Amino acid sequence: MVNRLSLYLRELQQLTRDGTETTSSTRLGELLGLTGAQIRKDLAYFGQFGYPGIGYRCHELSEQIRNILGTSHTWPVALVGVGNLGRALLRYKGFSLRGFEVVALFDVSPTVVDTDVEGLPVFHLDDLADTMRVRQIRLAVLSVPAAAAQQVANRLVVAGVEGILNFAPVTLSLPENVSTVGVDLAIELEQLSFAVVNRTENA
């Protein structure tokens, strides 16, 4: 359900940018390939939204969903691993549009530490705990090699991080009080190839 809320928010924000003031669950469903009933059920879980004869006010519902998701304020984020993937993530504008601001970078490579990347200073991983505390960072993005991911994640936990977005192709073992979301692009492509192959064979 939470994944769908993020999709609803994305579409509502796009509608607002396009100048659309109101929408309906049916219209949202058409945009997302869902039923209006599913959208109404998801939203009803969190309260009453919408107006009879009007539907949903796009900007207002966007703000309400942001409150539910905890993104009504800006989250400072640390990024660990300033290689090719890390730099690509830094250039991704979607983070800031959704309320996440990368404020600190960490690496261990002497060619990167103490330089600026995309306007941000790169700290050594040994400075992790102090920097996280001073900047009150609770979320981190992990874009390090798989072999180093668990060790770096452990250091993030010790530094007080409560949520990790993991781009390393490995499953992390973390305490129950630390949330993690893994993004493995190769697995996503495997799922896509499975869908294509099976659609072809069943045609």
Image (tube, rainbow, N blue to C red):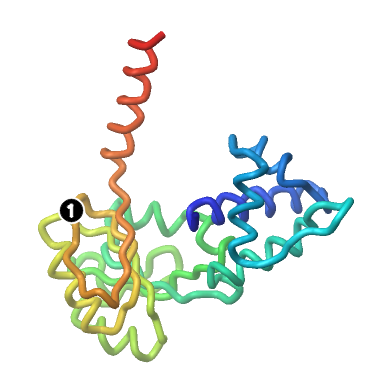
Left-right relation of 69 to 165? right
Which residue is found at the position 30% from the left and 25% from the top?
194
Corner quadrant of residue 43: bottom right
Q: Which of the two residues, 82 or 73, is positioned nearer the viewer here?
A: 73
Helix, strand or loop at label 1? It is loop
Residue in the image at 32% along x and 17% along y: 197
Q: Is residue 43 visible?
A: yes
Q: Position of residue 54 (x, y in %)?
A: 87, 52
* The C terminus: image quadrant: top left
Q: Which residue carries the number 1 mark?
A: 170
Task: Please state which of residues 85 and 53 is positioned toward the viewer in this rendering.
Answer: 53
Percent coordinates x, y for residue 90 in the rendering: 42, 59
Most foreground residue, 8 or 161: 8
The residue drawn where x is 27% and y is 56% is 83
Residue 136 to residue 26: above or below: below
Which x, y percent locates residue 187? 27, 39
Residue 132 percent location from the top left of the image: 33, 84
